[in-house]
Image (cartoon, rainbow, N blue to C red):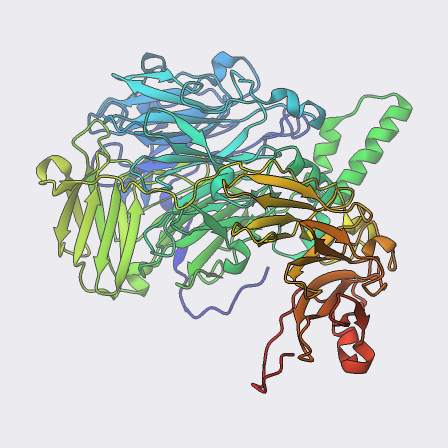
């Protein structure tokens, strides 16, 4: 792992020992018995953290969920000292039933935070029913999940409370996963089926009782959905909160767009071009301060070459292509940062931003940790056993084989004990303000080795900066004190406590627009973030050295808005919706699409599965699948544009002639070279008879020999409204072509051709021949490369070409 040189003499974060904080919690796993990674796939996924002020004393308290340990609640006594009140608060019955995600949420809108804990074990469903601890307002709680309809027995990872229907109360999305492995041969049989315990669920709050409306609301409940992360935000800026679900393994992530009518539509492929493969935690936030929420998803690609080669990757190219073809979308094993283009699409820039490879990571939290006005990124890291280590996988395979030969039982405890454990540090990245990040893990004091999963941020000591807490496997929880106020006293902030007038008392999904002389910031309030965790209800907005906020616009969940002028900095402000006068009701901007899709041509392109890498493993990219090519031109001169649709191997090139009523008539070209693969189409009047002819270049890689007859280009001459394949009018040199362009270089009144060679099949990167073809005026072409411009013969691997008068002498080159 490589760190840049540190400029700061003192780290931004200071790890506080348990002797200082009194926080003794450890998420200890006992994995050498019947419960181990051989029988429980998710044994090392860890647990969560929830932070919030449970006793309304102005100090945020901490709840840790435990897998094989009891969960614990710590009361903040000030000065980074905490008291374990788990037993007296009655938030744990001493049972170790595998708690996972946790939220502190005011479920009954009485002004006091309650605690909702998810559970997931493979035993009796009664032992994994989620629990809701209602705050008694005296540092004690009463478990009432059944009363509220929230005692669900799914294999739950996390809950997300939000007002999806904008009726003024909190509804809940329950993120679940399957504890059983589903073989690939069974994937297709799970589609469209709902699983009672493994499928995600949506609960609507109906007068304080939560009702499962998942199927009616369009929420998938398939057993193949291994949910690990959930993020809620208004993705399309229509005023209704949407949901992003991160799924592990083969099932693609889900993007549920809120229809505003009580239902959602899954639209992942409409917004994202590719996604993480083993998606875990996530966060949606506006990290580049342009007013649109971006998305970051976590995966498990190591940052260094050694671990990338040592740990087993997801699949080879053919497996990837098979999954895409089967409808499981384009998934790659790395973190992904999706930049919101504010037009209904996202651009994935994780590699450019420098945050794509952080090993087996879990939580992702965008927040302004140094109060400079830009959101940074914190990532938790580590998997307790190297279960994908290639050496271990070989050892495991050999052991299974030996036991089978000896007809003896496999000892899973033996395998667990022989599996390496590699602790890894967490990551923290500083926002460079140019869409990229700098790794500050060491410089900022976040470089301790361990196995961290859930994490949450909060201003635990009320000094105006965000502290961090992580839940660790087989180690004490990390509590980091943020020292921004000491290191950068010139940096300002504002701390906001939002209070809604509805039963969504803590104003979830409220939008904040911050305008200062130095820039703009955008926030949405959503405490559930990262992985299995819940952030503080208080919102801290870092301002850098800005001396004032011109205006702070608050758009509440009911779409009314308030504007605060010049609020006081470096203080906590409570904004109560009932005590502020709304300026207006913000109506969503209705936008009409620029284009409407109409299926006016019954054409379906057939692309046969081809893997160029199988022929030549060291290729940099696939070459064969660069098509299909398309040309739009008025071929028949009737004033309507026609289409020429190029083909792949084993199908003909097709022309669609448009009639005046805007319908199309299909016309197939000569199939003599039906095994050719079209790579370029050029339409010109090559024979000087005042109608358009067609030149089609052939190319490809996987299925062709270097001089294959099917690499012969084709020239079609238009005669009497039809097109005839010209025989012996082209050069007979067979080349895999990348580009063809025309120009009357000798000014004799006809068009000559440059044909650019793309590749020699099977011999990449050896340079192919390119050609310069002279027209005799009747569409007879002769190779004059050696005579005219021999240098162009081996100019390179041509993908595109154009003629231009570079030196303004009236001649194009």
Count all numbered tags in the image, as a single digit: 0
Q: Nearer the viewer, residue 211 or 51?
A: 211
Q: Quadrant of residue 696?
A: bottom right
Q: Nearer the viewer, residue 387 or 744?
A: 744
Q: Quadrant of residue 213?
A: top left
Q: Nearer the viewer, residue 147 or 298?
A: 298
Q: Position of residue 293 (x, y in %)?
A: 37, 47
Q: Position of residue 751 (x, y in %)?
A: 68, 70
Quadrant where the N terminus sits is bottom right
Quadrant where the C terminus sits is bottom right
Report whether 305 appears left or right of 117.
right
Report whether 106 appears left or right of 729.
left
Report whether 306 appears left or right of 200.
right
Task: Tell me what residue is drawn at x 63 percent, y 46 percent.
Answer: 422
Task: Tell me what residue is drawn at x 35 percent, y 49 percent.
Answer: 292
Question: Compared with residue 462, is residue 195 higher up or lower down, i.e. above or below?
Answer: above
Q: Is residue 316 visible?
A: no
Residue extending farthest right? 405
Q: Position of residue 226 (x, y in %)?
A: 56, 29
Question: Compared with residue 322, is residue 695 higher up or lower down, i.e. above or below?
Answer: below
Q: Position of residue 508 (x, y in %)?
A: 28, 35
Question: Compared with residue 428, is residue 476 higher up or lower down, i.e. above or below?
Answer: above
């Amino acid at each position: 792992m490589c760190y840049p040189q540190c400029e700061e003499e003192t780290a931004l974060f200071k790890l506080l020992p348990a002797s200082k904080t009194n926080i003794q919690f450890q998420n200890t796993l006992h994995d050498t018995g019947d419960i181990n990674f051989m029988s429980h796939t998710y044994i090392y996924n860890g647990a969560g953290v929830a932070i919030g002020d449970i006793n309304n004393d102005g100090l945020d308290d901490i709840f840790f969920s435990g897998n094989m340990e009891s969960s614990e609640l710590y009361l903040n006594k000030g000065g980074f000292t905490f008291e374990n009140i788990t037993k007296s608060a009655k938030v744990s019955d001493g049972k170790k039933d595998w708690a996972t995600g946790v939220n502190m949420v005011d479920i009954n809108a009485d002004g006091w935070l309650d605690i909702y804990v998810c559970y997931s074990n493979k035993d009796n469903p009664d032992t994994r029913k989620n629990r809701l601890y209602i705050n008694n307002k005296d540092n004690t709680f009463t478990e009432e999940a059944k009363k509220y309809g929230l005692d669900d027995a799914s294999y739950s990872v996390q809950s997300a409370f939000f007002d999806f229907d904008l009726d003024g109360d909190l509804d809940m999305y329950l993120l679940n996963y399957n504890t059983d492995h589903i073989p690939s041969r069974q994937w297709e049989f799970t589609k469209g089926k709902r699983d009672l315990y493994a499928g995600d669920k949506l609960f609507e709050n109906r007068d304080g009782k939560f009702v499962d409306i998942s199927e009616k609301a369009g929420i998938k409940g398939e057993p193949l959905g291994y949910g690990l992360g959930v993020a809620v935000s208004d993705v399309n800026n229509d005023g209704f909160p949407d949901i992003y679900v991160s799924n592990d393994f083969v099932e693609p992530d889900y993007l549920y767009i809120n229809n505003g009518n009580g239902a959602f539509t899954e639209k992942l492929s409409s917004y994202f071009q590719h996604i993480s493969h083993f998606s875990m935690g996530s966060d949606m936030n506006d990290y580049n301060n342009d007013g649109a929420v971006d998305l970051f998803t976590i995966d498990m690609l190591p940052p260094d070459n050694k671990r990338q080669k040592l740990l087993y990757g997801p699949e080879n190219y053919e497996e990837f292509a098979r999954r895409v073809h089967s409808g499981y979308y384009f998934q790659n094993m790395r973190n992904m940062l999706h930049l919101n283009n504010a037009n209904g699409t996202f651009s994935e820039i994780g590699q450019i931003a420098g945050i794509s490879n952080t090993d087996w990571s879990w939580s992702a939290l965008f927040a302004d940790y140094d109060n400079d006005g830009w959101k940074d990124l914190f990532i938790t890291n580590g998997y307790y056993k190297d279960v994908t280590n290639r050496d271990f996988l070989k050892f495991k395979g050999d052991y299974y084989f030996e036991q089978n030969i000896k007809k003896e039982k496999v000892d899973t405890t033996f395998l667990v004990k022989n599996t390496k454990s590699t602790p890894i540090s967490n990551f923290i990245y500083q926002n460079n303000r140019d869409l990229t990040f700098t790794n500050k893990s060491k410089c900022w004091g976040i470089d301790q080795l361990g196995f961290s999963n859930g994490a949450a941020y909060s201003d635990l000591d009320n000094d105006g900066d965000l502290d961090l807490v992580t839940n660790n496997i087989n180690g004490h929880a990390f509590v980091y004190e943020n020292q921004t106020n000491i290191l950068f006293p010139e940096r300002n902030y504002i701390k906001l406590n939002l209070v809604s007038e509805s039963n969504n008392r803590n104003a979830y999904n409220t939008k904040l627009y911050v305008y200062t002389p130095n820039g703009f910031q955008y926030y949405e309030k959503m405490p559930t973030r990262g992985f299995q965790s819940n952030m503080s209800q208080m919102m801290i907005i870092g301002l850098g050295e800005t001396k004032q906020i011109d205006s702070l616009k608050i758009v509440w969940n009911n779409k009314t808005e308030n504007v605060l002028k010049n609020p006081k900095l470096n203080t906590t402000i409570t904004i109560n919706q009932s005590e502020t006068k709304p300026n207006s009701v913000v109506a969503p901007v209705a936008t009409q699409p620029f284009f409407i899709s109409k299926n006016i041509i019954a054409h379906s392109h057939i692309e046969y599965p081809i893997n160029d890498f199988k022929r030549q493993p060291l290729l940099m990219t696939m070459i064969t699948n660069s098509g299909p090519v398309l040309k739009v031109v008025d071929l028949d001169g009737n004033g309507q544009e026609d289409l020429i649709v190029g083909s792949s191997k084993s199908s003909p090139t097709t022309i669609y002639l448009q009639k005046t009523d805007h319908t199309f008539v299909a016309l197939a070209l000569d199939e003599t070279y039906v095994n050719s693969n079209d790579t370029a189409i050029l339409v010109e009047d090559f024979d000087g008879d005042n109608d358009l002819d067609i030149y089609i270049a052939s190319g490809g890689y996987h299925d062709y020999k270097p001089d294959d007859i099917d690499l012969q280009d084709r020239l079609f001459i238009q005669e009497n409204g039809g097109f005839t394949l010209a025989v012996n009018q082209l050069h007979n040199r067979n080349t895999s072509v990348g580009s063809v362009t025309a120009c009357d270089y000798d000014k004799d009144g006809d068009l000559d051709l440059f044909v650019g060679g793309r590749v020699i099949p099977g011999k990449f990167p050896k340079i192919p021949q390119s050609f310069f073809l002279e027209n005799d005026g009747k569409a007879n072409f002769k190779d004059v490369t050696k005579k005219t411009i021999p240098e162009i013969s081996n100019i390179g691997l041509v993908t595109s070409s154009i003629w231009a008068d570079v030196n303004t002498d009236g001649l194009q080159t």
